Image (cartoon, rainbow, N blue to C red):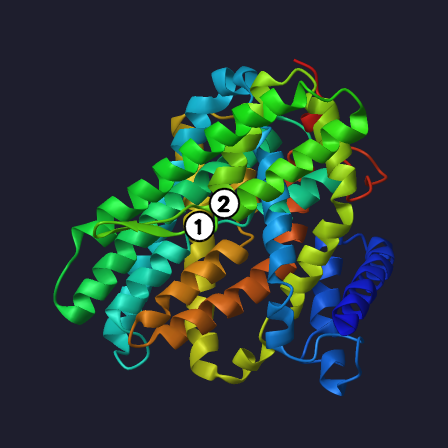
Amino acid sequence: MQEELLCMSVALIAGLMMNRLAKLVNLPAVTAYLVTGLLLGPFCVGRLGVVGLGFNSLEQVELFHIISDMALGFIAFTIGNEFRIHDLKAMGKQAVTVGIVQAVFTTAVVDLVLVALHFAAPQALSVSSAITLGAIAAATAPAATLMVVRQYKADGPLTRLLLMVVAIDDAVGLVLFSASFGVAMALESGTISVLTVVVEPVVEILLSVLLGLTAGFVLDWSERYFHSRGNRMSVTIAFVLLTVGLSMVEFDVGPVHCGFSLLLVCMMTGTVFCNVCKTSDELIERLDRWTTPLSILFFVLSGAELDLEILRNPLVLFIGVAYILARSTGKFSGAFVSCAATGCSKHIRNYLGITLLPQAGVALGMALTAANLSDGATVRNVVLFSVLVYELLGPTLTKWALTKAGEIRGDEPEEPGRVPTLVRREH
């Protein structure tokens, strides 16, 4: 325990110091924290084996997984607060359409490119792995996007649509991955299961929405019995932690394996809470300040768990570059087409796709499931390589896109822990 506490303190301090250096070259705080994690990870400082100074192995980084889950829970809860009835009436149809179309479009483009790669070089990648990678490509990381929005106080139509789309993207990505992975397993085994391809992903989404709805209403009811700001914030924190814990529960009902999506549960809790609680704006602002150290640790740990050993494998690099180019093309083209079809402005059409490039935890979780494929190790390594690239470049590209769209206006960025203007706005 002593070693873990030392690692956490060093990670926090180093992340904050690196952020100061990043400001000198005008880089987002997210990039600074990820680079800090890489430096403290098992392939740099951690390799020295000094107790408490960095992470000595990937297994040690895994010990802090609960922190990452907690941080994702609070991030999802905050994003859920963007689904206010006022915004849903104005942009709900656009968000749903764009969220679904860009994800499906991305999967189709990546599938096409990687399946073509399979026929060109069958030994490099199987069809089942190509299809699985196509579904994983649909996933977008909400954490890095939200951190950039917070830091630079981004606000405007593009920012509001972006936060809605990354939330919807999780549900769409879950369905696409479950269906594609089921088909991939069928190709390898010769049999297809309707349960794994259709029933289980739908059940997971429905259970997640139901749990989130229940938690949101119970949280609002509980808040009424506390009047001080400190107690109300404590209740909110307790409920977010409760939803994170409950979302990890898995059980079987007959032949159907049931589980929950952490992001969907916490997003739905935040959505319900922001629409039924009159003081949700103030509570979210105070909660966001409290979780700042947690967010920093989340990104430092994300950087530390990036496996640099994959850079030694030319085959992984080749497939990874093809995957990155295909996914980037799919995200940009899918967002452009769907935004044009729903009547979005020129700025949204041109820049939304760029802001959807970051990819991290959700994709890595899907890749872990894909390990059951015959060449599942290749899938995991390709995703690890893409996450390394997207996490380091994605926040900077997101900042650039929001700036070009005119939604980052201030010269001085806000501290990473502050809630963006769009979260605090009055309705």
Q: Residue 62 shows which numbered tag?
A: none
- What residue is drawn where x is 80% and y is 60%? 12
Residue 238 in percent (x, y) is at: 65, 39
Residue 189 versus residue 91: which sits nearer the camera?
189
Task: Identify residue for label 1.
Answer: 249
Residue 160 versus residue 267: which sits nearer the camera?
267
Instruction: Quarter of the image for the N terminus: give it.
Output: bottom right
Taking 347 as reference, is 291 above or below it? below
- What residue is drawn where x is 41% and y is 30%? 96
Q: Residue furthest left?
A: 190
Which kind of residue does numbered mark 1 sit on? Val
Taking 382 as reference, is 278 above or below it? above
Which kind of residue does numbered mark 2 sit on? Leu
- What residue is drawn where x is 59% and y is 36%? 77
Residue 266 versus residue 330: which sits nearer the camera?
266
Determine contact: label 2, label 1, CB under 8 Å. yes
Determine the CA span between mark 2 and mark 1: 5 Å
Task: Identify residue for label 2.
Answer: 246
At label 2, counting other C-alpha atoms closer than 10 Å, the crowd grade (few under 14, some 14-19, many 20 or more) is some
At label 1, counting other C-alpha atoms closer than 10 Å, the crowd grade (few under 14, some 14-19, many 20 or more) is few
Residue 327 in percent (x, y) is at: 43, 56
